[in-house]
Image (cartoon, rainbow, N blue to C red):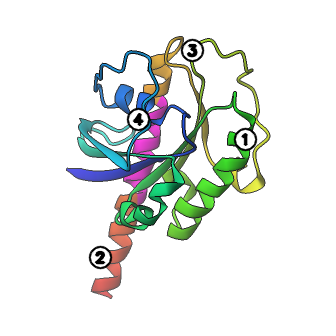
Amino acid sequence: MFKTKILFVGPTESGKTVVANFLSDTTENVGGEYRPTQGVRILEFESQPEGSGDKICEVELWDCSGDFKFESCWPALMKDCSGVVIIFNPDIPSHLKEIETWHSIFISTQSLQESQCLLIAHHKPGCEIERGRLPLAPNLSRLPLIHSDLEEEPEDVRHSFYRYLGNVVKAMSESREREEMSIIT
C-alpha cells in the first residue's frame, strides 16, 4: 500500500479546509463561520487513485495554515511530501499574485514534478466569477488547474483529485524504481 503525503497550501480564506474536509469525508460543525487553521491539520483516509488498478493508497492531507506567522514551520511540513496542492479563491484578485509565492516556497524548493502539483480555484457559494482561463504566471500555467465548486459539481472535484492522486502515486513508483535501479547498478 502506498502512503502519500499531500500538502494543501495557499492564501488565507481560500477554502483549503473545506476542500480537505470534503475529500477526506470529514465533517466538522463549522457553522459557516470562518476559523483560520492554526499551523496544520492532518487528515488521514484511504483512497483508490485513478489508474492504480486495485491498489489502495493511504493519504495524509496536510491542511496548512495560510498565515505567514507559521512560516518557520513550513520546512518541517515539506519533509517527505509527495505532492502539493495550491488552493486559492479566484474571487479575491490578490490570490492570483499570492499563489506565485506559494509556488516558489512549496514547489520550486522541492523540485517536484508538475504531475505532483495541482492548482485548485475554489469557488465559494454565491461567487460570480467565470470558470474560464485565469491570468496565471507562466510557471503556474504549466500546472494542472481544476475549478472547485462543491455546491454544483462536488463529484467532479473528487474525481479530479483522484486523477491527481494517481499521478502522484505514479511519480512515486517511478522514483522508487529509479532509486532501486541505481542501487543495483
Residue 107 visible to the viewer: no
Q: Secondary structure at mark 4?
A: helix
N-terminal of the pair, mark 4 or mark 3, is 3
Q: Depth check: 108 or 47 in front?
A: 108
Residue located beneath label 4 in the image: 162
Mark 1, other Cα within 10 Å: few <14 / some 14–19 / many ≥20: few
Q: Is residue 61 magenta?
A: no
Alpha-carbon distance for marks 1 and 2?
44 Å
The segment highlighted magenta reads 160-171
Report the amino acid beneath label 1. Ser
Tell me whether the residue at label 1 lies in contact with that at label 4, contact meaning CB atoms closer than 8 angstroms: no
Drawn side of residue 45 relative to residue 175, left or right:
left
Residue located beneath label 1 in the image: 94
Across and down, in percent, residue 182 comes to 35, 83
Q: Secondary structure at mark 3?
A: loop
Residue located beneath label 2 in the image: 180
Q: Is residue 170 magenta?
A: yes
N-terminal of the pair, mark 4 or mark 2, is 4
Report the amino acid beneath label 3. Pro
Report the amino acid beneath label 2. Glu
Residue located beneath label 3 in the image: 125
Give the label, 4 or 3, closer to the camera.
3
172 relative to 93, above or below: below
